[in-house]
Image (cartoon, grey):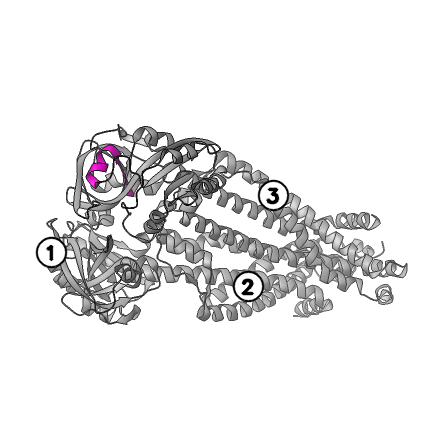
Amino acid sequence: MFLLRLAARNVFRRRGRTLIISSILVLAVAMFILFESLMVGMMDVSFRNVIDFEIPHIEIARKDYFTESEKSHTLPIGKRFIPEDRLISDVQKLKGYQAMTGILEFSADFISGRYEFPVRVRAVDPDTFNDVFMNSQYIVAGTFLDGNGPGVVIGSRLAEFFDLDVGEYFVMRFTDIGGSFNTIEGEVTGIVTTPHPDINLTTVFVNREHAAPRIGVEDLAVTQLMVRLEDRELASSQSNALMDTLGGNPLQARSYREGADFLVSLEQWGYLETYFLLALFLLVGAIGIISAVVLSAIEREKEIGMMKAMGMGESSILRLFMLEAGGIGVVGGALGCLIGAVIIFFFNTYGFDMDIFMDFSEIGVPVSGRIYGPWNFDAFLLIFVIVVIVSIIASILPALWAARKNPIDAIEKR
Amino acid sequence: MHLITIAWRNLKRHGLRTGIALLAVAAVVLIVIFSRGFVKSLTESSFRLYIDNMYGHVRITTEEYALREMLLPLDHMMDGFNSAGISSMVEELEQHSSVRYVMPRVRFGAMASRDDDMVRMMGIGIDVQRERTYGALAEDISSGRMIKEGNEILVGSGLMEDLKAEVGDRVTLVFSDAFQSLRGRTFQIVGVRDSGVSDLDNVIFYVPLDTAQDMLWLDDEASELLVYTYSTDTTEALLADMRTLLHEQGSDEYLAVPWNQANPFVEMYSEMDNIMFAAYLLFVVMGTIVVVSTLTMIVRERTAEIGMMSALGLSSREIMGVFILEGFFIGVIGSLIGSAVGGLLTLYYSQAGFYVEAFDMFTSEADILIEPVFYLSFSMENLVFSFIMGTVVVTLASFLPAFKAAKLEPVDALHYGDD
C-alpha cells in the first residue's frame, strides 16, 4: 500500500512527462478503438446485407448441393429435394423462427438484344420469399413478382448493362435437367437496387411456378430452404440444433456465416491487420515506457540510494518502478478510451461514408453507402488492459536496472 | 563549432538515456520503411498484373465497349482508323515515339461441357508474335508451350483443372459469334499458364488473334488495344499522345484510358501512398515524443549549467542551438540505424517474401489481381525518404525543449540546483 502511494505520488510529480509518454499510449488506444469499430461496422453491414438479400440466417440444402455449387461454375439443379412435412415442422420449432421459403436456384445466360450475361436465377414463391428476404422493398421500377407469369425481376446494374426497362423483353437460356438447352422468355416486371451490389448484377428472380416445369423439376422441388430467425446470434446454434434433428438425412443446415466464405476471410484479414497495427503502436509505446522509467531512475538516483540505504529491498524498488509504469499505462489507457469514446460517438451518430475511399462493391464486398460504428465495450476493456499490461512488462528491464544500482554510488554522485 | 562539441559531449554523458531515444527513433523509422516497402510492393506487383494483363499503360476501346465490358460484347469492336482495319491502326500507333508496342486483343465468352457441368470461361484472342516478343504471358507458361497458330489454346491452370484436361488434349468449346449464333469448335491445348493469381488462372484461355477473328466472324477487328510505353512513369505523356492521335484521326468514338484510372481498386491503391503518409507521420511523431521527453529532462537536469553558460555570455540563441543540435544528432543517428536495419530487412524480404493465410483466402475470393505472397519492396528512395522524415520531425520537435532552455533566466537557473 505504501508502495502504491509512493508510485502514485511519483507519477504525478512529473506530470508533464507522464502526460507526454502516456500520449503515445493514448494514440495507440484511440487508433485501435477507431479501427476496430470501423472493421466491426463494415462487417456488420456486410453480413446484414448477405442475410437480407442473399443467404438468410439458416440455409438448408442437400449436402452434395453445397459441395457441388462451391466447386462448379454451374449450380447443380439436379441436387434438389422436396421438403417433407417433418422437416418443415422441425424448422418451425426452432428458437426465434420467423419465416421460411423454398428457392430453386439455377444458372442461366440472360439474353436481351445482342448481349448475354451469365446470371444466377432464383425461382421463388413471392409470398413466402418476401417474408424472408427484403428484395421486394427495394424495387425502383415496376413491381415485384406476383406469383405467376413469366416475368422477371432484375437488378439495376444488370438493367443498366442491357439498357433494359420495365416491360422490355428478355430470354434466359439454361440447361434443363434432361441436359438440353431450354429457355424462359418474358418481360421485365421490376428492377431492384439493393444495398448488396452482387444481387444488383448477377441475380434474376422469377416465379417458381413458372420456372419449375421449364427446368423439368417437380412442382414442390427446391434446391434450398431459406429460414429467417429473429436474431443473427441464434443462427449458428439453431443451425446446429437442426443438424442434430436431421440425423442421417442427406440434407444439411448451415448458418449464413458458413455460406459467406469471402466475408469470413475478409473479417479475419481485417482483424489481422488491426492487431498488427496495434502491435506496432504498442512497440513504440513500450519504448516510451522504458524511456520514462530510465529517465525517472536517473533523475531520482539519490532518492533511490537513500531508500536503499534505509533498508528498502531491491524487489520493493523494482515493484515501485513497475507500479509507476503501470500508472502511466492507466493514465494513457483511460485518456485513450475517453478520446476513443468521443470518436465512436460521432462515428456512431453520423456514420462514415465508405464511398470516399472506394467502391467496395467492385471487389465484391457487399457494402455501399454509409456505415456506422457500433459501441463495443469489450474493445475498450481489452485495449485498456493490454496497454496497462504492456506498460508493466516493458518496465521490468529498466526497473531492474534501476533497482540494482549501488546505493553508495548513487548517493555519492556529484 | 564549439556548440557541436558541447552537444555531442552532452549526448555521451548518459549513454543509456541517449540510447533509448535513439532506439525510439530507429524503431519508428524502421516501421515507416517496413510499411512503405510493404505498400509499395503490394501496389507495384498488383499494378504490374493489371498493366500486363488487363489495361496496358493506356487501353483503347470504343466507348460502348468500356461501358458493357462485363458482358464481353462482340458488337463494339474497333475496326481501325476510318475502318481501315485494326492491324494498320496498330502499326500507325507504333510509329509514335512514346509507344513501345501495342497489343490488339479480342475478348469473348465461351463454354465447355464437362460431365454434367458447363464450364464458363473467357477467351482472349492475342497477337501471338507480339505477345511472344514483349508480353508477360510467355513467362508464366508452366507446362507445354506458347500457342502459335490455328486452333491452339493456352489455358489457365485453374481452368485446366475445371476442364479435367491435360496438355495435348482436345476440347470443344461453345460460344456465340458476332451474329449471335451459337457455334462450336475443337481446340488443342498446347500449354498451361500459371500466373499464381486465381482471377487470371481460373477463367482465361488464350487463342491466336486471327483464329479468334475467324471463329467469331469478325473482320480485321479487336475489342481492345493495350498500348505500352517504356515506363509506368511516362503514362501521362503516352495518354496525351494517344488522345491527340485519336482526335486527329477523327476517331472520337475511341476511348483511351490510363491504367491507373481503369479500375476503382487500382485508382484507390495508386492514391495509397498519400493516404498512408499521415499514418507514417503519426508513427514518427510517436517516436519523437520519447526524444522530446528525454530532451526536456536534459534541459531540467542541466538548468544550473545553462545558467552558468548564459552568465558566461552564451546568447540564448546559442543555447537553443545546443539543444536543437542534440535533437538533430539523435534524429540523424536514430534514423540512420533505422534505415540500415530497414534496408537489410526489406532487402531480405524483397527476395524471400512471406505468406499469410488469411490474406490468401481473402484475395482468392475477392475480384482483385494480387499475389497472395507478400514481398517488401527494397528501394533507396524509401530509405532516404524515411531517413529524412525521421531526422526532420525529430529536429523540429527538439525546438520545444530548446526554446524552454533558452528562456531560462541565468540567475534563476543558477539557483535551481539549490532546492
Q: Does the magenta stretch include residue B157?
A: no
Whether callout 1 and callout 3 share a subunit is answered no
Q: Residue furthest right?
A: A310
Measured Cα–Cα span from mark 2 to mark 3: 29 Å
What residue sits right under mark 3 in the picture? A380
Residue B32 % position (x, y): 52, 60
Looking at numbered disc 2 in the image, what kind of residue is underneath it?
A: Leu
Given residues A168 and B322, the one toward you in this image is A168
Residue B111 % position (x, y): 21, 54
Q: Is residue B155 left or right of residue B3?
A: left
What residue sits right under mark 2 in the picture? B30
What residue sits right under mark 1 in the picture? B218
Other-residue count near label 1 (Cα within 10 Å), few / some / many at <14 / 14–19 / ≥20: many
Label 3 sits on a secondary structure element that is: helix
Q: Main secondary structure of the magenta part?
A: helix
Other-residue count near label 3 (Cα within 10 Å), few / some / many at <14 / 14–19 / ≥20: many
Q: Which chain carries label 2?
A: B
The image quadrant that residue B270 belongs to is bottom left
Q: Is residue A219 above or below residue B373?
A: above
> What's the residue at 24%, 56% (across, down)?
B59
Given residues B396 and A388, the one toward you in this image is A388
Q: Mark 3 lies on which chain?
A: A
